[in-house]
């Protein structure tokens, strides 16, 4: 929602797959957009373990993650249009916010730091804070608890079907 990361996730994974000789495709990547990392990794193991072995697929997953982080650290994830304006508006109106992301905290911190946005999100709920990924509403329930604002006064900005389902499950407008 804040960063244009999807293409970078794909590119990083494709680079590593090509280096390792794993038949990875953009179609395979797109099949798992909006799904938790754990589910994607389990799917990679199910799909590739027999041909390449469990250990090699673990190495593939770790190398793809590292490649992605390096791209993020270099600032390759562009901000989506309107982010600065939205943050300015929220500040101007004194509207509190929580960043609720399915990403790992390390990824979120890397992205925010590279874009000089760390101070804009003092409250974050992420993959590391929940036991169930979207579409489970847990992440939004935890974000709601951090704000201590009635659900009727909240709105969730979301860009994935699983996130929309999670918001509805939490009883919060999207």
Image (cartoon, grey):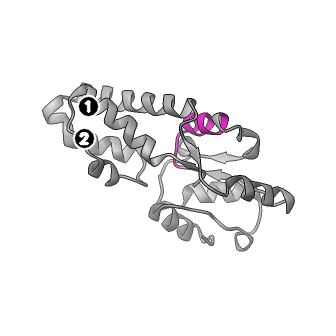
| Tags 1 and 2 touching, CB below 8 Å | yes
Residue 53 horizontal side relative to residue 128, left or right: left
The picture places residue 59, in percent across and down from the top left corner, at: 32, 25
Q: Residue at x 37, y 27 (%)?
A: 63
Which quadrant is the N terminus positioned in? bottom right
Distance from Cα at disc 1 to Cα at disc 2: 8 Å
Q: Residue at x 55, y 37 (%)?
A: 107
Q: Residue at x 35, y 45 (%)?
A: 40
Residue marked by disc 2 = 24
Q: Main secondary structure of the magenta part?
A: helix
Tell me where residue 54 sits by quadrant: top left
94 and 82: which one is in front? 82
**Vertical arrangement, residue 69 with respect to residue 144, above or below:** above
The picture places residue 91, in percent across and down from the top left corner, at: 83, 56
The residue segment tinted magenta is 102-113
Count residues near mark 1 (Cα–Cα under 10 Å), then give few for <14, some for 14-19, many for 20+. Answer: few
Which disc number belongs to residue 58? none
Which quadrant is the C terminus positioned in? bottom right
Tell me where residue 153 sits by quadrant: bottom right
Residue marked by disc 1 = 18
**Vertical arrangement, residue 16 with respect to residue 28, above or below:** above
N-terminal of the pair, mark 1 or mark 2, is 1
Residue 141 horizontal side relative to residue 11, left or right: right
Tell me where residue 151 sits by quadrant: bottom right
């Amino acid at each position: 929602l804040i960063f244009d990361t999807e293409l970078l996730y794909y590119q990083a994974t494709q680079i590593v797959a090509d280096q390792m000789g794993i038949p990875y495709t953009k179609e395979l990547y797109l099949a798992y957009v909006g799904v938790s990392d754990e589910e994607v990794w389990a799917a990679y193991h199910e799909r590739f373990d027999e041909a390449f072995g469990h250990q090699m697929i673990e190495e593939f997953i770790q190398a793809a993650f590292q490649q992605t982080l390096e791209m993020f650290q270099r600032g390759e994830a562009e901000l989506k249009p309107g982010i600065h304006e939205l943050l300015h508006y929220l500040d101007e109106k004194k509207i509190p916010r929580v960043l609720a992301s399915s990403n790992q905290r390390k990824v979120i911190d890397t992205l925010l730091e590279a874009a000089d946005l760390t101070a804009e999100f003092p409250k974050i709920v992420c993959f590391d804070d929940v036991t169930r990924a979207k579409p489970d509403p847990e992440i939004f329930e935890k974000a709601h608890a951090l704000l201590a604002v009635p659900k009727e006064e909240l709105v969730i900005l979301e860009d994935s079907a699983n996130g929309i389902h999670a918001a509805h499950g939490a009883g919060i407008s999207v």
